[in-house]
């Protein structure tokens, strides 16, 4: 475990942030300020031409017919589920290892979340576990599958779609972390009947506040979502149903339009930094490969499916003695995060679903082992060296 240390004997940095948005802002400052000025001059601050332009541009980017802007990724999930017809008594199957909104949006739409365990290599919903559920006689009320493209890698949509077709289920993508990701030639956001994106400030394509969007191949669903995001109103003061105030504001749309031109380049930069992390960990002798190799080395690297174009919203490893390692890195002012420390089926608010510890062992194991390391397009190689050297220092 000496090669990386010998290469950079004097390397020491004061800190490495988990994310540094200022570096990105400096690249786009002039364009962003011009876009904000354009919105202010228009005096049109909610929906309107900027939002409509963003919707067209993102629909083209994802290769779909329609996109519907809304106020957050959470609202995007709700809109997708509601427009798909999910209602009281319906089950929607998703992963227990994701952000809370993947399951809470199902409840908000009136449905009941049900879970299947994850693939331990990709952290995404395991189609084999989904198949066990639907063939196990427990699918009478199952209406939809909600796979999550976790950390920027698409779930195995081919296998999931085959099951959905056989059992007459809808597939709705949670693509909140996966703008620009692909599975083969198909883009995230184009593989289900609809897909939800988040533009939270930490995302690969990020607003300067909350923002979200739904893509869909179904024009009727698109029109329905446009009503639902605006109090169920197709035109002013006419309300055909109960909707919500989920409108996207023009300022965020204008900012996102600026950044959309750069997102593919930023994603490429993330992929290069992920590859560099892999190389550095291997050179340091810190890592092992293979599903059963977790005890032979302290770090397991993220696994990318052969068909996947991973955009590395996060670079997440499995780490032996994770909590101690994280404390050590924090002491060196190296940012880390745990996505996610409590699986959804064990969240206190979901106790009524009846799940117990041990029901989804792979999700539970991941929650105890995963550690996200600094990852953003402007991360320097020197910073990556210091992160990996510090991890080597901890384990040596």
Image (tube, helix red, strand yellow):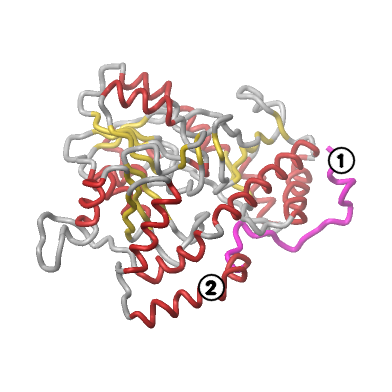
* Residue 379 percent coordinates (x, y): 68, 57
Instruction: Please tell me whether the stretch drawn in magenta is mainly helix, strand or loop.
Output: loop
Residue 16 falls within the magenta-colored stretch: yes
User: What's drawn in magenta, residue-wise?
Assistant: 1-22
Residue 333 falls within the magenta-colored stretch: no
Left or right of 147? Residue 206 is right
Secondary-structure class at tag 2? helix
Residue at the bottom extreme, as displayed: 41
Total labels drawn: 2
* Residue 218 percent coordinates (x, y): 27, 43
Nearer the observer, 14 or 192:
192
- Would you name the residue on which mark 1 appears? 3
Would you place residue 90 above or below residue 372 in this image?
A: above
For the point 88% across and 47% down, the residue is 7
Callout 1: few (<14), some (14-19), or many (20+) C-alpha neighbours within 10 Å?
Answer: few
- Would you name the residue on which mark 2 appears? 31
Tell me, for residue 69, which label it has, or none: none
Would you place residue 131 above or below residue 227 in this image?
A: above
* Residue 282 percent coordinates (x, y): 76, 36
Nearer the observer, 332 or 61:
61
Nearer the observer, 190 or 283:
190
Secondary-structure class at tag 1? helix
Q: Of marks 1 and 2, which one's residue comes earlier in the chain?
A: 1
Would you place residue 1 above or below residue 257 in this image?
A: above
For the point 52% across and 34% down, the residue is 184
């Amino acid at each position: 475990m000496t090669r990386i240390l010998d290469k950079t004997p004097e390397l020491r940095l004061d800190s490495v942030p988990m994310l540094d948005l200022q570096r990105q802002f400096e690249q786009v400052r002039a364009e962003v300020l011009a876009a904000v000025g354009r919105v202010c001059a228009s005096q049109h601050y909610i929906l309107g031409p900027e939002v409509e332009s963003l919707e067209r541009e993102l629909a083209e980017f994802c290769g779909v017919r329609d996109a519907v802007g809304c106020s957050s990724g959470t609202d995007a999930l709700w809109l997708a589920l509601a427009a798909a017809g999910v209602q009281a008594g319906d089950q929607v199957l998703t992963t227990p290892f994701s952000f809370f909104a993947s399951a809470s949006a199902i409840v908000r739409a009136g449905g009941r979340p049900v879970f299947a365990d994850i693939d331990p290599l990709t952290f995404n919903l395991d189609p084999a576990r989904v198949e066990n559920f639907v063939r196990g006689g427990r699918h009478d009320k199952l209406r939809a599958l909600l796979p999550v493209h976790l950390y920027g890698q698409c779930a195995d949509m081919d296998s999931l779609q085959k099951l959905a077709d056989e059992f007459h289920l809808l597939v709705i993508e949670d693509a909140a972390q996966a703008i620009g990701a692909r599975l083969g030639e198909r883009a995230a956001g184009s593989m289900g009947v609809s897909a939800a994106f988040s533009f939270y400030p930490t995302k690969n394509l990020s607003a300067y506040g909350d923002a979200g969007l739904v893509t869909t191949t179904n024009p009727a669903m698109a029109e329905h979502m446009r009503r639902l995001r605006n109090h169920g109103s197709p035109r002013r003061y006419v309300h055909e149903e109960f909707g919500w105030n989920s409108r996207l504001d023009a300022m965020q749309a204008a900012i996102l339009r600026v950044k959309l031109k750069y997102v593919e380049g930023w994603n490429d930069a993330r992929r290069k930094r992920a590859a560099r992390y892999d190389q550095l960990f291997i050179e340091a002798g810190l890592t092992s490969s293979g599903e059963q190799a977790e005890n032979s080395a302290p770090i397991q690297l993220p696994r990318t499916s052969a068909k996947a174009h991973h955009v590395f919203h996060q670079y997440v490893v499995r780490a032996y003695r994770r909590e101690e390692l994280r404390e050590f890195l924090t002491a060196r002012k190296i940012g880390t995060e745990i996505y996610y420390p409590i699986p959804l089926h064990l969240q206190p608010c979901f106790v009524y679903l009846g799940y117990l510890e041990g029901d989804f062992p792979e999700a539970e194991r991941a929650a105890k082992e995963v550690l996200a390391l600094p990852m953003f397009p402007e991360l320097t190689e020197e910073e990556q060296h210091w992160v990996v050297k510090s991890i080597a220092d901890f384990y040596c």
